[in-house]
Amino acid sequence: MIVTAALLIVLLVVFVLGMTVGDFPLSIGDLFRTLTARGTAANNFVVYDLRLPRVITGILVGLCFGLSGAIFQSMIRNPLATPDIIGVSAGASAAAVFAILILGLSGVAVSAFAFGGALLIAALIYLLAYRNGLSGYRFVLIGIGLAAVMIAVINYLMTRARIQEAQAVLVWLTGSLNDASTAGMLTLGALSLLIIPLSLIAGHWLGGLQLGDDTAAAIGLSVQRSRLLLILLAVALAAVATAAAGPVGFVAFVSGPIARRLTGGTGTALVPAGLVGAVVVAAADLAAQHLLPIPLPVGILTAVIGAPYLIVLLIRTNRHGTGG
Amino acid sequence: MAPTGSSVPGPAEVSADTPIAAEHELRTADLSLGYGDRVIVSSLSVQIPTGQLSVIIGANGSGKSTLLRGIARLLSPISGRVLLDGRDVHAMPSKELARIVGLLPQSPTAPEGITVADLVGRGRYPHQGWFRQWRAADDHAVTEAMRATDILGLADRPIEDMSGGQRQRVWIAMALAQETDVLLLDEPTTYLDLAHQIEVLDLLAELNHSRGTTIVIVMHDLNLACRYADHLIAMRGGRIVAEGAPTTVITPELVDDVFGLSATVIDDPVSHTPMIIPIGRRHDPASTSRR
């Protein structure tokens, strides 16, 4: 509870910073007046058209990625089993790039393709990894393999792209909030409002599933059914987030472990994991825009944070010889 | 001869206010089980004696664990049925079954960093509603389960800190917190040293006596099986070869039949149950003459 409250406060601070800092600095008073519909026309433009979509999209994307990663990690019992590592995000990107470059689509249609790509890759991993039950290790290895294939597909498509097209595709390679729009924010918000509560409710199965299939069944869980539903929800979370901002790297991967570290390591810590994701994305975007000499896509910054952790985890796993 | 007992401190008493188990009839009817094309248990009908401690014995691959998994619904039957009070367990809602029949699998896995109390609390799952209400009854059951297994003092410690024996008691506590009237255990003593084996079996016998919980254990140690079992079920090749009280079932012929082991059976000086003394080639008079 304390951790959740503290994360909410940090998130609020990041939100206020994201809304006030920039080429047109606002005071907190101005922000409050504008948000309560008493702002000037100029402030309204800065708040509602420029900053709010970006900041809210960032928070929601982080929330979805953080939750999705934590669900996957608990369910598969492997810290590597997150959508950004096992190719669910890469599948979404490949589908989006395909839609832009080959089909010439744009806007919502591309997001729809990204969503479909994520689901397709997840289904493929599940089918390939399933053999008399689901082995976490096989799930992760097949996922990493498929991620590599998806990245190869993206690279192949990129070689055929014209330079203007390549610009449009860029967001699908790193993850960025540069294209955040009010319409996109509202779509993401509506979908999150539907999927996040369902995920949190279904999350109470994770306590059983974490104990392994046999014990989970012994305490009265329908193992296959609950796991399938959880995978569906976690993939949907990753898919809507990717559709909104591209594959913001490593957010799903680091949020769960950070949240569990903060809460003292027990339980599945879904809500804290979601909040950690939100803070990471919002704060990273803030830093990427204002702290660096040239503004960068947020995905590059999250990758800089996440990649070293991945290396540490791989080294530690190997030393234990458990393979995860 | 006076029973000497072991020098190991016994488990704490199962407290007196624990509910007495309701009677449930559990049996299999022409049950066949297997993995893929491999049939391991074939057309087996057995009645689990209510309120007693039964032990299933048999050589490796005799189908004893498979039978237990089939009864606990971890395996779907190839044919036949598992009946609890006349109802097919496969047609029962999983939570309802889990409130009556509990199972401790052979090598359960704990999530990293989980505390003892948290793990034991997971056994309350079948008693909880959709929105995971944790009630006073849950607290009571968890505390009672930890008291019975003597791990109350370890409640806030992470499971990684536990020794093998302690860890096994934590898992048993989780099964106890489930408050089932039937408890199935798949080799609960296999990886424990002798003192801890006795401790776990004492605890289960105590549970059986005080609450009347029907207990079924799969285990390898024949002498301990004879000591603790009210009812022995001996299996070979997926079928039951003999069943009944240890004193009536265990003979040198049966041991030879079930395990392919020549042995002498004597009276256990402590418990007065059958005690199996394996002979082996090293001490077999027939092979000594060849030396």
Image: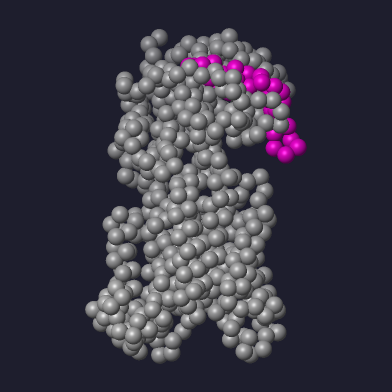
Which residue does the image show at 31% across and 20% down from the upper left?
Answer: B16
Which residue is more in the foreground, B145 or A298?
A: A298
Q: Quadrant of the C terminus of chain B?
A: top right
From the viewer's perspective, tell me whether residue A235 is left or right of residue A9: right
Q: Position of residue A276 (x, y in %)?
A: 39, 65
**Nearer-the-camera pick, A232 or A121:** A232
What residue do we see at 45% from left, 19% from top?
B22
State the image quarter where residue A111 is shown: bottom right
Rendered location of residue A273, percent (x, y)? 41, 60
Q: Position of residue B170 (x, y in %)?
A: 40, 37
Q: Is residue A157 left or right of residue B52?
A: right
User: Is B233 in front, or is B271?
Assistant: B233
Q: Position of residue B195 (x, y in %)?
A: 42, 29
| Span colored in magenta | B27-56
Residue at 35%, 82% in the rendered image? A44
Please name the predominant secondary structure of the magenta segment in the image. strand
